[in-house]
Amino acid sequence: MNTAGPPLAPTLAERVIRRRIARRGPVTFAEYMGLALYGSGGYYTRADYSPLDDYYTSPQVHPAFGALLAVALFRCWALLGRPVPFVVVEPGAGDGLLCRDILAAAAYLPDGFARAVRYVAVDVRRGAGWESGLGNVRRVTGDALRLPVRAGVGCVISNELLDALPVHRVRMEGGRLRELYVDIAPDVADGYEGALVERAGEPSTPALAGRLSEAGVALVEGQTAELCIRYDDWAQSVAGALSSGFVITIDYGRAAADLYDSAQRPDGSLVTYRNHVQTDAPLWDAGRQDITAQVDFTSAQRAGERAGLTTVGNVAQGWLLQRLGLQTLRRKGPPASGMAGGWQTLAPDASGGLPEFLPDGFDGGGLDAGSDASRAWLTALTHLIRPGGLGDFRALVQAKGLPASVAAQALSWLEQSDESDSYSPAALAGLIPPGALRLGAGRVF
Ligand SMILES: C[S@@+](CC[C@H](N)C(=O)[O-])C[C@H]1O[C@@H](n2cnc3c(N)ncnc32)[C@H](O)[C@@H]1O
């Protein structure tokens, strides 16, 4: 049995969870995670939630992430025959950073793309008003698993949504699949009513064993794994939002065979973050820390296929962003006026050179490699594609209601550059001037 640590005054979310357990008995980890993240006082629903406090996502690293995804959306729009309107739905849009970056860059793309875009940003969190003044943006408070949107022709794009969906936890014990529940320990110590503890029991649903067998995964004795059984809801929801178009899903995760490899991840992939520290104590301080698990992309892809989505590709973020023209943006360098506030410039390495993880082929044209602004620019852009970090995130691209030839064209766009194509990713990225990527306060690097 794993205890939840030293006594702390319970948070609102923890009090809600304790009441639930006291009334109905132990809850599955998925129910616990749902309440800790999205219930009253939950991590994402509490009033003082501030995403930069605990972790960062690609849009928070650099606006080039959104600018390059604008290029991806432009390419999808062109493949779809330049429909007007072209609806872009972003479930899990959070504070709208990605939306604003995409729209800022879209303004520089050709053929009236920006005028065609209608952006629908969906999040379970209530609106903070970030969309005011953006005429082509509608912000909707709602559940990504039941999207309240009928977009027609368009794209659904999300970043780090699936890893935030509640997961069940299972463990192989004595040759039997057991599920981990959250319970209240019976003891009363230090005047505290009993810690939240993990307790193994019978699986709450046959879907857990079903998921493992569908993914071809056999857990070994003692192995723990997380299973999200909401991918079908997600896939049906996004597929249902589109009459035709593309679904681009970016997140951290792996193919099932890799994710559930007992040698690499014997204890699963669940992590908790607080103040940018990986705390790995999911039963502590519910509502005050993020809880997340890697996405099983094999199952997400299959759920999409069951919902009528064709898989176009599943590629690494680093590769996708480079295919979309990241190196072009790197070469262009930061805005001439210098970096706006909020950025930290990484210190040069010991020899006074640039940060060490610059990829080969770096072309200094347009950059002053000695300046702090250029160094910060290169560092942030490199961060988005760095192997072992954000560069290893996956981008799953799926199509709905499109002839095979159009899906195949999307695949060729992902796989190889056609230099004769005036809409080559590098050419499109070249249209976006550094000034469009002006850096706001609060970006990470
Ligand atoms: C890790 S944050 C990512 C935010 C943003 N996409 C980014 O890249 O910075 C996950 C976001 O998904 C939202 N979210 C989680 N589950 C959701 C659901 N079922 N429906 C809609 N939004 C959800 C959370 O409120 C949060 O804003």
Image: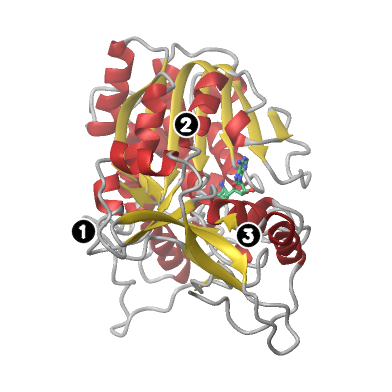
Relative to 439, does residue 379 appear above or below in the rendering? below
3 vs 1, front mark: 3
Q: Is residue 83 left or right of residue 329?
A: right
Pick the front one: 251 or 18: 18
| Residue where numbered disc 3 is placed | 51
Badge 2 crowding class, 10 Å Cα cut-off, few under 14, some 14 to 19, many 20 or more, is many
Pick the front one: 77 or 124: 124
Badge 3 crowding class, 10 Å Cα cut-off, few under 14, some 14 to 19, many 20 or more, is some
Label 3 – label 2 distance at C-alpha: 27 Å
Tell me which numbered mark, 1 or 2, is placed earlier along the sequence.
Answer: 2
Q: Residue at (28%, 12%) from the top-left corner?
A: 405
3 vs 2, front mark: 2
The image quadrant that residue 211 belongs to is top left
Tell me which numbered mark, 3 or 2, is placed earlier along the sequence.
Answer: 3
| Residue where numbered disc 1 is placed | 360
Most distant residue in the bottom direction: 190
Q: Is residue 188 left or right of residue 201?
A: right
Q: Residue at (62%, 51%) from the top-left corner?
A: 34
Amino acid type at circle 3 is Pro
Pick the front one: 34 or 88: 34
Amino acid type at circle 2 is Asp
x and y percentages locating residue 355 in the rendered image: 34, 72
SS of the residue under disc 3: helix
Tag on residue 299?
A: none
Tell me which numbered mark, 3 or 1, is placed earlier along the sequence.
Answer: 3
Q: Residue at (37%, 78%) from the top-left corner?
A: 348
SS of the residue under disc 1: loop
Mark 3 lies within 8 Å of ligand 1 (Cβ measured): yes
| Residue where numbered disc 2 is placed | 232
SS of the residue under disc 2: helix
Q: Report whether residue 385 is seen.
A: no
